Image (cartoon, rainbow, N blue to C red):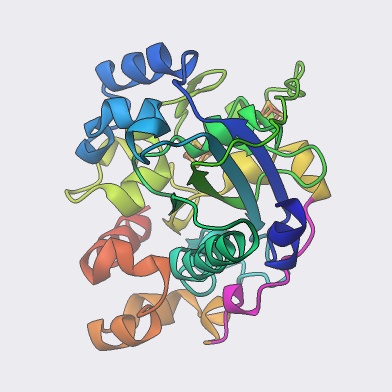
Amino acid sequence: MKQTARALGFDFCGISKAGFLEEEAPRLEAWLQQGRHGNMQYMENHFDKRLDPRLLVEGARSVVSLLYNYYPQQQQNSDAPKLSKYAYGHDYHEVIRDKLKTFLDLLKAGIGEINGRAFVDSAPVLDKAWARKSGLGWIGKNANLINRQQGSFFFIAELIIDVALDEDGPIKDYCGTCTRCIDACPTQAIVQPYVVDGSKCISYFTIELKDQIPESYKGHFDNWAFGCDVCQDVCPWNSFSKPHQEPLFNDDRGLLDYTTQQWQDMTEEVFNALFKNSPVKRTKYKGLKRNLEFLKRG
Ligand code: SF4
Ligand code: SF4
């Protein structure tokens, strides 16, 4: 299993027994009740399924968690409105979905007919919880999964399959006394260690929010136009990040060299062409324009 994952380009693979996520259930419930998900209503859906993969895949026995590195070698023009690193290249959903499909096909070819489903950043699966359980890292105070060898710039994916496998166990939390992410968050969205108020996070404002960004956040966006990497950039464990090897995650459109003026002048036609296969299309032209306008006003 792990060799196949490696051969397909996944950096880490860990296995858990499929079952109810007891520890996470009360935490998820409290987080939702406190409205930390802002207007991301989809987070409220499939509550039971999210806590138990056996409700998603009939006969599920194992959750195979996979990490795919996206830490880029390329750097963005430091004066321009900032894009989160995961959005420099091709949409990761497509890239990883294809690999997961191949993974399932190889498993079927190797061990016979199995029932399974593949997920990548998909609402019904608590991907970080499964990756943690499978020993791929711990959940840091910034609520990201942190891998001891390579930090946190990873996409997380899962295969949920009806095959019993040996489990890997969780590892301990290595945040220690560090509070760098909490101290550096430009909008104080990390309201207590391990709890990010999604409704205060720049990623939420610049990608998920459909309305105007509240004026009270003016001057606090640190020039982020799509997503935000601050709490990962400051994490000491990310000094171990290594550049990814996925050509599709590279910016091949010269986007990272764009000046502020070029961003501001971007027409809808150019946006559609540039971001056709990019995660940035999620915010739509209107969202990007709103974000840029918000940054322009200070
Ligand atoms: S992504 Fe940015 S705004 Fe959100 S919690 Fe991290 S540092 Fe704060
Ligand atoms: S910056 Fe420090 S406290 Fe935050 S996640 Fe990284 S190690 Fe943990």
Overall secondary structure of the magenta section = loop
| The residue positioned farthest toward the left in the image shown | 211
Q: Position of residue 217 (x, y in %)?
A: 34, 39
Is residue 298 or residue 250 the one in the foreground? 250
Q: Is residue 250 magenta?
A: yes
Q: Is residue 274 magenta?
A: no
Residue 167 lies, with reference to residue 294, above or below; the image says above
Residue 137 lies, with reference to residue 295, above or below; the image says above
Q: Position of residue 90 (x, y in %)?
A: 49, 74
What residue sits 42% from the left and 73% below the top?
278
Viewer can see residue 94: yes
Is residue 159 or residue 77 the one in the foreground? 159
Viewer can see residue 266: no
Which image quarter: residue 34?
top left
Which stretch is magenta?
Answer: 241-252
Q: Position of residue 84 (x, y in %)?
A: 52, 58
Q: Position of residue 71 (x, y in %)?
A: 68, 60
Task: Judge from the rendering whether residue 221 lies leftward or rightward of residue 251; answer left or right.
Answer: left
Which image quarter: residue 246?
bottom right
